[in-house]
Image: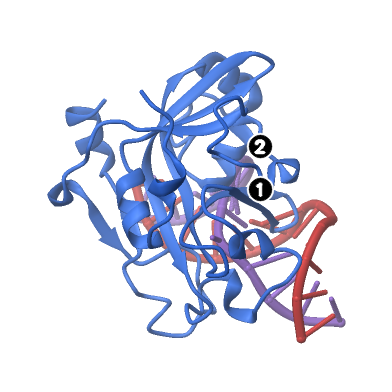
Chain colours: A blue, B red, C purple
Amino acid sequence: MPILPREFYSRSALEVAKDLLGCNLVRIQTGIRMAGIICEVEAYQGEEDLGCHAHVGRTRRNEVMFGPPGHAYVYFTYGMHWMLNIVTEREGFAAAVLIRSIHPSEGIKLMAENRPFHAFKKDWLNGPAKICQAIGLDGSFNGLDLCDPNGQVFIESGKKIILQDIVATPRIGLNTVPEPWRSIPWRFEIPGNHFQENYG
DNA sequence: CGGCCGATTATCT
DNA sequence: GATAATCGGCCGG
Protein backbone atom coordinates (compact mmCIF):
# COMPACT_ATOMS: atom_id res chain seq x y z
CA MET A 1 0.00 0.00 0.00
CA PRO A 2 1.31 3.50 -0.85
CA ILE A 3 2.58 5.94 1.76
CA LEU A 4 0.14 8.74 2.46
CA PRO A 5 1.36 11.90 0.68
CA ARG A 6 1.58 15.43 2.00
CA GLU A 7 -1.75 16.36 0.38
CA PHE A 8 -3.53 13.78 2.52
CA TYR A 9 -2.52 15.67 5.64
CA SER A 10 -3.09 19.14 4.17
CA ARG A 11 -6.74 19.17 5.23
CA SER A 12 -8.73 19.83 8.38
CA ALA A 13 -7.90 17.60 11.31
CA LEU A 14 -11.50 16.38 11.38
CA GLU A 15 -11.30 15.02 7.85
CA VAL A 16 -7.82 13.60 8.27
CA ALA A 17 -8.78 11.95 11.56
CA LYS A 18 -11.68 10.03 10.03
CA ASP A 19 -9.68 9.09 6.94
CA LEU A 20 -6.82 7.76 9.07
CA LEU A 21 -9.12 5.06 10.46
CA GLY A 22 -8.26 1.83 8.67
CA CYS A 23 -4.83 3.08 7.59
CA ASN A 24 -1.63 1.29 8.53
CA LEU A 25 0.78 2.95 10.96
CA VAL A 26 4.27 1.64 10.16
CA ARG A 27 7.42 1.84 12.26
CA ILE A 28 10.75 0.32 11.29
CA GLN A 29 12.93 -0.39 14.31
CA THR A 30 16.38 -1.93 13.87
CA GLY A 31 15.33 -3.02 10.39
CA ILE A 32 12.21 -4.77 11.62
CA ARG A 33 8.87 -3.60 10.35
CA MET A 34 6.03 -3.12 12.83
CA ALA A 35 2.56 -2.06 11.75
CA GLY A 36 -0.93 -1.61 13.10
CA ILE A 37 -4.26 -0.58 11.66
CA ILE A 38 -5.42 2.69 13.16
CA CYS A 39 -8.79 2.20 14.85
CA GLU A 40 -9.13 5.18 17.24
CA VAL A 41 -8.09 8.83 16.82
CA GLU A 42 -8.86 12.32 18.13
CA ALA A 43 -8.80 15.65 16.30
CA TYR A 44 -7.36 18.84 17.79
CA GLN A 45 -7.54 21.94 15.71
CA GLY A 46 -6.74 25.59 16.11
CA GLU A 47 -5.99 28.00 18.89
CA GLU A 48 -9.75 28.41 19.40
CA ASP A 49 -10.02 24.75 20.46
CA LEU A 50 -9.46 24.94 24.22
CA GLY A 51 -8.67 21.23 24.26
CA CYS A 52 -5.77 21.73 21.85
CA HIS A 53 -2.27 22.40 23.16
CA ALA A 54 -2.09 25.30 20.72
CA HIS A 55 -4.80 27.28 22.53
CA VAL A 56 -2.12 29.04 24.61
CA GLY A 57 -0.33 30.17 21.48
CA ARG A 58 2.99 28.97 20.15
CA THR A 59 5.35 27.41 22.70
CA ARG A 60 8.42 25.23 22.49
CA ARG A 61 6.33 22.12 23.10
CA ASN A 62 3.61 22.73 20.54
CA GLU A 63 5.57 24.48 17.80
CA VAL A 64 5.60 21.41 15.54
CA MET A 65 1.80 21.64 15.34
CA PHE A 66 2.17 25.10 13.79
CA GLY A 67 4.49 23.72 11.14
CA PRO A 68 3.78 21.98 7.84
CA PRO A 69 1.43 18.95 7.68
CA GLY A 70 2.58 15.36 7.59
CA HIS A 71 4.98 15.61 10.51
CA ALA A 72 4.93 13.84 13.88
CA TYR A 73 4.07 15.86 16.99
CA VAL A 74 5.35 13.70 19.85
CA TYR A 75 4.98 15.12 23.33
CA PHE A 76 5.58 14.02 26.90
CA THR A 77 3.00 14.09 29.67
CA TYR A 78 2.17 12.77 33.15
CA GLY A 79 5.86 12.55 33.88
CA MET A 80 6.31 9.32 31.94
CA HIS A 81 4.25 9.00 28.76
CA TRP A 82 4.86 9.86 25.11
CA MET A 83 1.99 10.54 22.70
CA LEU A 84 1.99 10.45 18.90
CA ASN A 85 0.07 13.03 16.89
CA ILE A 86 0.00 13.68 13.16
CA VAL A 87 0.18 17.35 12.14
CA THR A 88 -2.50 18.45 9.65
CA GLU A 89 -3.71 21.63 7.93
CA ARG A 90 -1.54 24.33 6.44
CA GLU A 91 1.64 25.68 7.92
CA GLY A 92 0.81 28.38 10.45
CA PHE A 93 -2.48 26.77 11.54
CA ALA A 94 -2.00 24.46 14.51
CA ALA A 95 -3.87 21.17 14.16
CA ALA A 96 -3.14 17.51 14.73
CA VAL A 97 -4.64 14.05 15.09
CA LEU A 98 -3.82 11.96 18.17
CA ILE A 99 -3.41 8.23 17.50
CA ARG A 100 -5.20 6.46 20.34
CA SER A 101 -5.27 2.82 19.36
CA ILE A 102 -4.15 0.36 16.72
CA HIS A 103 -4.91 -3.21 15.77
CA PRO A 104 -1.45 -4.85 15.46
CA SER A 105 -0.76 -6.42 12.07
CA GLU A 106 3.00 -6.84 11.60
CA GLY A 107 6.02 -7.15 13.87
CA ILE A 108 3.88 -8.10 16.81
CA LYS A 109 6.76 -9.97 18.40
CA LEU A 110 8.88 -6.83 18.58
CA MET A 111 5.94 -4.81 19.90
CA ALA A 112 5.59 -7.38 22.63
CA GLU A 113 9.27 -7.06 23.52
CA ASN A 114 8.79 -3.29 23.71
CA ARG A 115 5.99 -3.76 26.24
CA PRO A 116 7.33 -6.35 28.66
CA PHE A 117 4.83 -7.76 31.17
CA HIS A 118 1.89 -6.30 29.27
CA ALA A 119 2.10 -7.97 25.86
CA PHE A 120 -1.01 -9.82 24.74
CA LYS A 121 -2.98 -8.90 27.82
CA LYS A 122 -6.38 -7.43 27.16
CA ASP A 123 -6.12 -3.76 26.13
CA TRP A 124 -2.36 -3.87 25.60
CA LEU A 125 -2.45 -1.51 22.61
CA ASN A 126 -5.48 0.71 23.21
CA GLY A 127 -4.01 3.94 24.48
CA PRO A 128 -1.77 6.64 23.01
CA ALA A 129 1.10 6.02 25.41
CA LYS A 130 0.86 2.25 24.99
CA ILE A 131 1.27 2.64 21.25
CA CYS A 132 4.37 4.79 21.57
CA GLN A 133 5.91 2.28 23.93
CA ALA A 134 5.01 -0.64 21.67
CA ILE A 135 6.49 0.82 18.50
CA GLY A 136 9.40 2.53 20.22
CA LEU A 137 8.64 6.23 19.87
CA ASP A 138 9.85 9.01 22.16
CA GLY A 139 10.64 12.71 22.01
CA SER A 140 13.48 12.20 19.59
CA PHE A 141 10.82 11.56 16.93
CA ASN A 142 9.15 14.93 17.46
CA GLY A 143 9.02 16.84 14.17
CA LEU A 144 9.80 13.80 12.03
CA ASP A 145 8.54 13.95 8.44
CA LEU A 146 6.07 11.09 7.89
CA CYS A 147 6.09 11.63 4.14
CA ASP A 148 9.70 10.54 3.77
CA PRO A 149 9.59 7.08 2.12
CA ASN A 150 12.98 6.28 3.62
CA GLY A 151 11.89 7.28 7.11
CA GLN A 152 11.35 4.98 10.07
CA VAL A 153 7.77 6.09 10.66
CA PHE A 154 5.03 6.60 8.08
CA ILE A 155 1.41 5.74 7.35
CA GLU A 156 0.12 3.66 4.46
CA SER A 157 -3.35 3.90 2.99
CA GLY A 158 -5.61 1.03 3.93
CA LYS A 159 -9.14 -0.14 3.83
CA LYS A 160 -11.61 2.70 3.37
CA ILE A 161 -13.89 2.91 6.39
CA ILE A 162 -17.38 4.09 5.52
CA LEU A 163 -18.75 6.93 7.58
CA GLN A 164 -21.56 4.79 8.88
CA ASP A 165 -19.07 2.51 10.62
CA ILE A 166 -17.34 5.39 12.46
CA VAL A 167 -18.43 6.27 15.98
CA ALA A 168 -17.86 9.88 17.14
CA THR A 169 -17.67 10.65 20.88
CA PRO A 170 -16.05 13.30 23.11
CA ARG A 171 -12.28 13.34 23.40
CA ILE A 172 -10.76 11.53 26.37
CA GLY A 173 -9.08 13.09 29.38
CA LEU A 174 -10.04 16.75 28.89
CA ASN A 175 -11.20 17.00 32.50
CA THR A 176 -10.37 20.67 33.04
CA VAL A 177 -11.26 21.91 29.54
CA PRO A 178 -14.33 24.19 29.35
CA GLU A 179 -17.40 23.39 27.30
CA PRO A 180 -18.16 23.02 24.50
CA TRP A 181 -14.63 21.80 23.78
CA ARG A 182 -14.69 19.26 26.54
CA SER A 183 -17.63 17.41 25.02
CA ILE A 184 -17.38 18.11 21.32
CA PRO A 185 -17.38 14.71 19.54
CA TRP A 186 -13.97 14.79 17.91
CA ARG A 187 -12.91 11.31 18.93
CA PHE A 188 -13.44 8.82 16.13
CA GLU A 189 -13.21 5.07 16.31
CA ILE A 190 -14.06 1.82 14.68
CA PRO A 191 -15.73 -0.10 17.52
CA GLY A 192 -13.49 -2.96 18.62
CA ASN A 193 -15.81 -5.89 18.13
CA HIS A 194 -17.02 -4.42 14.85
CA PHE A 195 -13.43 -4.01 13.72
CA GLN A 196 -12.54 -7.62 14.38
CA GLU A 197 -15.64 -8.88 12.63
CA ASN A 198 -15.35 -6.67 9.57
CA TYR A 199 -11.83 -5.38 9.24
CA GLY A 200 -9.58 -7.73 11.20
C1' DC B 1 -15.58 -5.02 34.52
C1' DG B 2 -15.58 -0.52 36.51
C1' DG B 3 -13.94 3.04 39.80
C1' DC B 4 -10.28 5.04 42.52
C1' DC B 5 -5.64 6.63 43.11
C1' DG B 6 -0.60 7.17 43.05
C1' DA B 7 3.44 7.52 39.99
C1' DT B 8 6.71 10.83 37.93
C1' DT B 9 8.85 14.92 35.37
C1' DA B 10 9.03 18.18 31.11
C1' DT B 11 6.94 22.24 30.22
C1' DC B 12 4.69 26.36 31.14
C1' DT B 13 3.12 30.46 34.28
C1' DG C 1 5.09 25.84 41.95
C1' DA C 2 1.26 23.63 39.28
C1' DT C 3 -0.31 20.93 35.80
C1' DA C 4 -0.95 17.03 32.58
C1' DA C 5 -4.66 14.61 25.31
C1' DT C 6 -2.21 8.30 30.88
C1' DC C 7 -1.33 3.93 32.81
C1' DG C 8 -1.55 0.10 35.80
C1' DG C 9 -2.44 -1.87 40.32
C1' DC C 10 -5.87 -2.67 43.73
C1' DC C 11 -10.43 -3.18 45.31
C1' DG C 12 -15.41 -4.33 45.32
C1' DG C 13 -19.38 -6.45 42.76
The local crowd at label 2, few if under 14, some if 14 to 19, many if 20 or more residues have their Cα within 10 Å, is: some
Q: In this rendering, do the residues under marks 2 and 1 share a single chain?
A: yes
Q: Name the amino acid type tagged 2.
A: Leu
State the separation of the CA atoms marked 2 and 1. Answer: 7 Å
Determine whether the residue tagged by mark 2 lies in a helix, strand or loop: loop
Q: Quadrant of the C terminus of chain A?
A: top left
x, y (%) of residue A18? 30, 51
Q: Is residue C13 above or below residue A175?
A: above
Picture quadrant where residue A24 is located: top left
Circle 2 sits on which residue? A137
Q: Is residue A158 above or below residue A174?
A: above
Q: Earlier along the polypeptide chain: callout 2 or callout 1?
A: 1
Q: Contact, CB < 8 Å: mark 2 with mark 1? A: yes
Query: Horizontally, is A161 left or right of A139 in the view?
Result: left
Q: Name the amino acid type tagged 1.
A: Trp
Q: Quadrant of the N terminus of chain A?
A: top left
Q: Residue at x 43, y 50 (%)?
A: A9
Front one among A119 and A46 = A46
Q: Is residue A134 visible?
A: yes
The local crowd at label 1, few if under 14, some if 14 to 19, many if 20 or more residues have their Cα within 10 Å, is: many
Circle 1 sits on which residue? A82
x, y (%) of residue A20? 36, 44
Q: Residue at x 64, y 19 (%)?
A: A113
